[in-house]
Amino acid sequence: MKVPKKNNNLKILKKENKLANMSKHFLLELYQCDYEKLDDEPFLRCTLNTAAKLANATVLNLISNKFQPQGVTAIALLAESHLSIHTWPESNYSAIDIFTCGHNMQPDIACRYLIEALMAQEHFLRVIIRNPPITIKNQTRPII
């Protein structure tokens, strides 16, 4: 395997001068959440669906898995990208990932809703701005 030279990726990025600052990636960590809510798969599916709709997203599909003895992973596939949750009820902790494409979705609203719905006493949010090529900025794809 060939190892890239140091800072090679930064040089490539600097060459690209047509980027569309249009995507956000929210990484939300919730602490001291309600145990029962973190272990309730139907509740989490409904909560994820509601969070997506409140954020002005179009839910295409929602899948989930309940782990034993506890924990749930649920993923909402969105027309605008995705929203996922992974829970560790035994630690009263949840990790949430919201990736948006375009300017219409409001992931901050989904974050606020999820913090309240899971009764998180503390949270930590990181926001990453994605910069896809400007050529995809105005592309729309039909939902089949």
Image (cartoon, grey):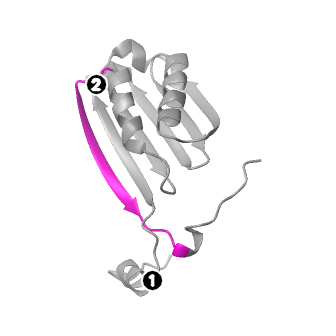
Three-letter residue code for mark 2: Ala
Question: How far from the left and from the top, in percent, is residue 49?
Answer: 54, 29
Verify whether residue 15 appears in magenta. no
Instruction: Name which residue lies at 25% across and 34% down.
Output: 123
Quadrant of res 90: top left
Q: Is residue 124 above or below residue 64?
A: below
Name the residue furthest top: 36
C-alpha distance separating marks 1 and 2: 41 Å
Name the residue furthest bottom: 15
Quadrant of res 78: top right
Instruction: Name which residue lies at 37% across and 36% down.
Output: 111
Which residue position holds label 2?
Answer: 120
Q: Residues within 10 Å of mark 1 (few under 14, many from 20)?
A: few
Secondary element at tag 2: loop
Q: Are marks 1 and 2 in contact (CB under 8 Å)?
A: no
Residue 129 visible from this viewpoint: yes
Instruction: Name which residue lies at 34% across and 33% down.
Output: 112
Question: How far from the left and from the top, in percent, is residue 77?
Answer: 60, 42
Which residue position holds label 1?
Answer: 16
Residue 73 visible from this viewpoint: no
Secondary element at tag 1: loop
Q: Tell me where the magenta segment starts and ends, as one range.
A: 119-134
Residue 23 appears left or right of 120: right
